[in-house]
Image (tube, grey):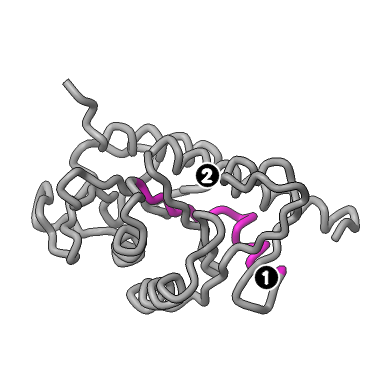
Amino acid sequence: MSTDPRTILMTAAGHFYQLGWMVGTAGNLSVRLPDGSFWITASGRHKGQLCMDDFIRIAPDGKVLEQPTPDVRPSAETSIHQAIYSLFPEAQACYHVHSIEANLVSHFTTGDSLPLPPLEMLKGFGLWEENPQVEMPVFANHLQVPQIASDIYERFQAVPPSLNALLIRNHGVTVWASSPEGARNYLEIAEYIFRYMVAARKVGIE
């Protein structure tokens, strides 16, 4: 019997909660199913205590296909996951967390991309270059999340990103991958890079 993907998301959310990346009800995780629909964490659910009833299944067009009870609502960021799955057919998981470091580094640039230091860890994103010069896309935060999703879709449709990650200023980081395990790895690598950037600033390394 195959593992219910919701259990994978529950484990990941508990791990990220312990790391301080999904405190309280913040953040959202999703995994795509073979029919193109995806399970996503429901709105307002504590990410350190998720259960099987804390997920909603969403169709590619955003329609709710399964929910445990009518009062359980989809995550506010569902439209962002929709945009990612629409843009990248190979994406099978999308993780979005709210870490302190992600918010701090989003202010290290005033533009729409954040230059990343040429760290060895970038190989984890598949960037097998010596001293890679790569930037992470940065998007403005909007109260209406569908506007963020629209911005992401329009920019990436025109110019695909060089790595599977993006920042929303004062909001958080989103990654996507061809598996839940891959998404977890990408997220941990991104957060490592953010922590390095914050620490480097403290000691005067630019």
Q: Position of residue 46 (x, y in %)?
A: 35, 46
Decide which of 205, 92 is in the foreground and name it.
92
Q: Is residue 182 above or below residue 159?
A: above
Q: Which mark is residue 185?
A: none
Secondary structure type for disc 1 = loop
Residue 60 falls in image quadrant: bottom left
Q: Is mark 2 in CB contact (under 8 Å) with mark 1?
A: no
Q: Residue at x 47, y 35 (%)?
A: 15
- Give the magenta range: 93-108
Quarter of the image with the N terminus is top left
Type of amino acid at the residue the image marks with label 1: His
Decide which of 199, 132 is in the foreground and name it.
132
Instruction: Determine whether, in the image, residue 88 is placed left or right of residue 19.
Output: left
The residue indicated by pointer 1 is 107
Q: Position of residue 63 (x, y in %)?
A: 13, 63
Q: Which residue is outermost to the top?
A: 1
The residue indicated by pointer 2 is 186
| Residue 31 part of the magenta-drawn span | no
Q: Position of residue 135 (x, y in %)?
A: 65, 63
Instruction: Determine whether, in the image, residue 97 is placed left or right of residue 119.
Output: left
Distance Cα–Cα, label 2 vs label 1? 21 Å
Q: Nearer the viewer, mark 2 or mark 1?
A: 2
**Is residue 178 visible to us here?**
yes
Q: Residue at x 10, y 55 (%)?
A: 65
Q: Is residue 125 above or below residue 5?
A: below
Q: Earlier in the sequence, mark 2 or mark 1?
A: 1
Decide which of 69, 162 is in the foreground and name it.
162
